[in-house]
Amino acid sequence: MTNSIVDSSLLWIRGTRIPASQYKRIKTRLEENLQGEPSRTDYLELARLELRKQNYGLAMEAVEAALQLDPTDAESQLLYANILELTGEWDRAKSVYRTNIMLHPVSAEGYREYGRFLLSMDHDDSILHIRSLVLKGLELDPKDSYAHTILAEIYWKLNQRSQAELHLEIGLRYLQEEPWIHQRRASILAELERFAESVHHYKQALKEDKKNIYIRHQLQKVERLSKQKTV
């Protein structure tokens, strides 16, 4: 597998930035809990907390501790794969994503995340294989708005515009107010030259993280394209 950039929407998955005072308070509580009777739940919460501060090493330590308590836990495995992906260990991430769906064949999130990962990488896997993974996840959870958005992106890459637009519309029915879904919808809507809708979703994503320079730049770019289209 060749190197690729991190899927930008993955940066949203574990939460937006957190104030230093709140971070310290939550971390202290979790560390006190873990000194008593360590639990997988507390380790995973700690891992997500460290991710929100972009402390990837500490996040990795916490999720590895969770996996020591339960090596086959689906949630822990996916978070572990996410961190590997964020830190550029793509071959290891791919192995963990693949193992996850083998161990948990009824996990909709597992299929969606593996498909999302492969779609974001320079890889040897065919787009049809990726589509089959995301479709399998949707068979298990037909109301997964994020999966429908990813599938729309896949169909766009396959030059099947009508299918891409269909899954955007289906995803809208079940839209969850999560910034990473808004960001991904905005991106594919811009590709489809539906600029006004793209602007709306970029603005929704920006509400959750006003300091996100990448989203702000994308919003400005799409706003310019929207004005050019109406001239």
Image (tube, helix red, strand yellow):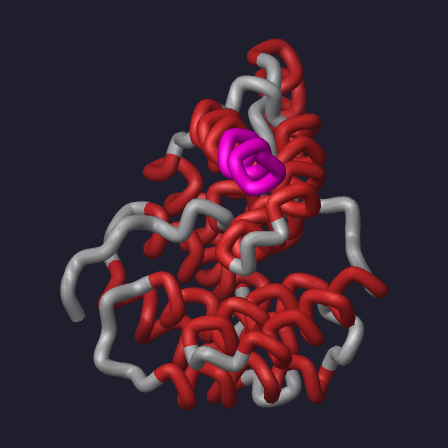
Who's the residue at 45% across and 78% down the image? 159
Q: Residue furthest left?
A: 2
Instruction: Where is residue 129? Give x, y as percent.
Output: 41, 88
Bounds of the magenta segment: 222-231
**Is 86 placed above or below 72 here?**
above
Which quadrant would residue 56 be assigned to in this image?
Answer: top left
Q: Quadrant of the C terminus?
A: top right
Count of marks overlaid on the render: 0
Residue 133 seen from this side: yes
Q: Does the magenta run of residues contain 121?
A: no
- Magenta: main secondary structure equals helix
Q: Residue furthest top?
A: 21
**Is 172 placed above or below 21 here?**
below
Residue 71 seen from this side: no
Who's the residue at 70% across and 75% down the image? 166
Given residues 120 and 223, the one toward you in this image is: 223
Given residues 13 and 203, the one toward you in this image is: 203
Who's the residue at 84% across and 64% down the image? 173
Who's the residue at 48% across and 74% down the image? 154
Given residues 223 and 201, the one toward you in this image is: 223
**Residue 115 left/right relative to 149:** left
Instruction: Where is residue 114? Give x, y as percent.
Output: 46, 73
Q: Residue furthest right?
A: 173
Instruction: Where is residue 4? Give x, y as percent.
Output: 23, 56
Q: Residue furthest front?
A: 231
Instruction: Where is residue 23? Give x, y as percent.
Output: 59, 20
Q: Quadrant of the N terminus?
A: bottom left
**Residue 225 left/right relative to 189:** left
